[in-house]
Amino acid sequence: MCYHNSLSISIQMLGKRYNRKIDLIEIVEDIISESYHVNAFNYPTYPIITADEEIQAFNWGLIPFWVKTEKDAKEIRSRTLNARSENLFDRPSYREPVKRSRCLIPATGFFEWRHEGKQKLPYYIHLTDEPVFSMAGLYDRWHDPETNSTIFTFTQVTTDANPLMEWVHNSKERMPALLSRKDEETWLDPTLTRKDIESLLQPYDESRMAAYPIDRNFLKMNPKEKRIIEKVDHSKGPEETKGLF
């Protein structure tokens, strides 16, 4: 599935890209800005675009509004980092957010592994015509009864892989549900029907995407290091990969 993003852009540039204000989240700018690797398993704070006029700062790993205890919240969010597009209207965790709380997850790229025999080889994937693009997301707010605080969290929607991602992510054949720029504000429209929503969650056009191999140890690198997304040679690779880079 899709648990590793790249967001190598300043929060100020994000504000310009999405025509959103940034006043209320400058205090966490160093946390959510310019990271070449964002790992969902750390439940990070991440900039999220909603219908609000300001960029929001939510945590990855959705906690549904109906969760009762902090213990249950910690347990469920480990299973809600991704949400399968096919199940959004059926799963209890997503069927309300998909109707009322959709968001955009900005990214400059994302990571997946290709399985070749016993090897797992990491790849960096990005768009060729959009330096910053949007993944479809859902969010929810949860009231923590122990701290009397409100916590906002999100999940990233995934869909079937296109041919490029079938080759890269050949174990699961999934990819993030990417939205074209013209569909971004549409995704946030609260009046969308189920048919409208499902029509937006299709495999993205592979001709607008590119993938290349990166360092096998990128997970151990400082997330602020640009070398995370530098192309490397996974031992020359099979002949069939040449057309992908």
Image (tube, rainbow, N blue to C red):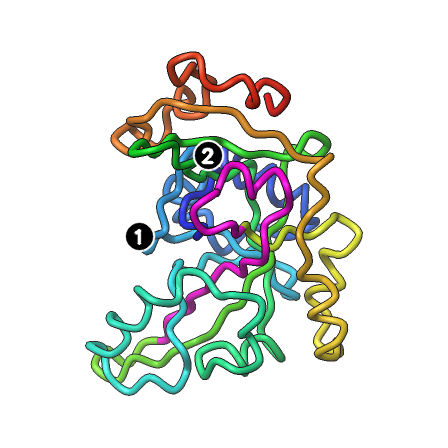
SS at badge 1: helix
Nearer the observer, 104 or 193: 193
Residue for point 49% across, 31% down: 124
SS at badge 2: loop
**Does the residue at mark 2 contact the one at mark 1 (Cβ under 8 Å)?**
no
Q: Is residue 37 left or right of residue 72?
A: right
Question: Which image quarter: residue 197?
Answer: bottom right
Residue for point 54% across, 34% down: 125
Q: Amino acid at mark 1?
A: Phe
Residue stretch rendered in magenta on the structure: 150-174
In the rendered picture of this protein, how many numbered marks are placed on residues? 2
Instruction: Name above or below for residue 165 compared with residue 147.
Output: above
The picture places residue 160, in percent across and down from the top left corner, at: 59, 56
Q: Residues within 10 Å of mark 1 (few under 14, many from 20)?
A: few
Nearer the observer, 153 or 244: 244
Residue for point 64% across, 21% down: 243
The picture places residue 214, in percent across and down from the top left corner, at: 42, 24
Q: Is residue 21 left or right of residue 116?
A: right
Residue sitting farthest toward the right: 182
Q: Amino acid at mark 2?
A: Glu
Residue 1: within the magenta? no
Q: Is residue 127 left or right of residue 10?
A: right
Residue for point 28% across, 87% down: 68
Would you name the residue on which mark 2 appears?
A: 34
Q: Earlier in the sequence, mark 2 or mark 1?
A: 2
Instruction: Name above or below for residue 67 compared with residue 85.
Output: below
Question: Which image quarter: residue 165?
Answer: top right
Would you name the residue on which mark 1 appears?
A: 41
Q: Estimate the spatial distance between the alpha carbons at disc 2 and disc 1, rounded to whole Å.
A: 18 Å
